[in-house]
Amino acid sequence: MFRFIVRRLLQMVVAFFGTTLIVYALMFAGQGDPIQALAGERPVTAAQRAYLTEKYHLDATGVGGFFYRYFDYLKNLVRGDLGESLTGRSIGEILANAWPVTIKLALIAIAVAVIFGVTAGVLAGIRRGSIFDNSTLLLTLLVLGIPTIVLAPLAQYLLGVKWQLFPATSGADPSFYALLLPGIVLGSLSLATALRLTRTSVAENLRADYVRTARSKGLPRRRVVSVHVLRNSLIPVITFLGVELGNLMSGAIITEGVFNIPGVGFNLFRAIRTEDGPLVVGIVSVLVVVYLVSNLVVDILYAVLDPRIRYE
């Protein structure tokens, strides 16, 4: 297990450098005028041009200059300095204010997926072919067919504006209740996928040889399902939910934008729209770390759920 963790950590380092290099290149390398790319569509004065040239080492040109600036960014990043956005604000300060909101939103979404998706998936798998099973499959297929960019404004209009069951927007300091509707919207796709995955896994394990052996020994059905079937069935579900948690924290751009939630996704969308290159690269770098760490935690949990799994 120790060798596996070390190997995964080395893979994470390579993936991090590769991802940040691609994002940095997409934001800065392909621009004819890097200073204008940093400033976006706003006019640049001579004083601003001189300041940006010195700050971002733009006097170094060519491929060598690009890698010099990239490694200078990595050097600051390792020290915990994410730099400043084009507005002059510290990127670390922006993320510090945005992360608590996005984490709350992602936890609500993943809780919805676990409580409703996994529970309904277990029941559907046990009662395969029943009315409940067919109904849940139909509903999840409907949810999976509606993209978030359609589902979010639709839920906002029906539940927030027309029926006024939830706040239509969350505001600067959203409460738990204000984040509940966007959390449900954000977690709806995860809920549908978790339900179908759990249902399939439970149904397959119920037909496994070890389940027939346990039943032949006289074990009650409740014990067979709760002790044997669920333990093995939850392995792919845990994998999905662990990776999905990282996706939810990084992929809440549409939901946070529709409901006006000042989270990480909202700030990333605003940075892309205003062509704030340093802010985009800084946010994406942090999101890559979150995604890689969540994948590592999921892989380690494999051995906790199933001792038969061994890594070479």
Image (cartoon, rainbow, N blue to C red):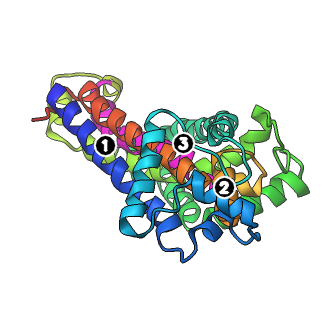
Q: Position of residue 111 (x, y in %)?
A: 57, 35
Would you identify the image quadrant in which residue 208 lies? top left
Answer with mark 3 or mark 1, whichever residue precedes in sequence: 1
Magenta residues, dominant SS class = helix
Circle on res. 51? 2
Q: Position of residue 188 (x, y in %)?
A: 59, 51
Residue with the most extreme bottom position: 32
Q: Secondary structure at mark 2?
A: helix
Would you identify the image quadrant in which residue 104 lies? top right
Q: CA distance from mark 1 to mark 2?
A: 33 Å
The residue range painted magenta reads 227-253
Answer with mark 2 or mark 3, whichever residue precedes in sequence: 2
**Residue type, label 2:** Tyr
Q: CA distance from mark 2 to mark 3?
A: 49 Å
Q: Secondary structure at mark 1?
A: helix
Instruction: Characterize the local packing of mark 3: few (<14), some (14-19) or many (20 or more) Cα atoms within 10 angstroms.
Output: many
Say if mark 3 contacts mark 1, CB within 8 Å.
Answer: no
Using the image, determine if residue 46 lies above or below residue 81: below
**Residue type, label 1:** Val
Q: Nearer the viewer, mark 1 or mark 2?
A: 2
Q: Nearer the viewer, residue 292 or 145?
A: 292
Question: Badge 3 is on which residue?
Answer: 113
Q: Is residue 158 magenta?
A: no
Q: Is residue 244 magenta?
A: yes
Q: Residue at x 76, y 67 (%)?
A: 45
Question: Badge 1 is on which residue?
Answer: 13
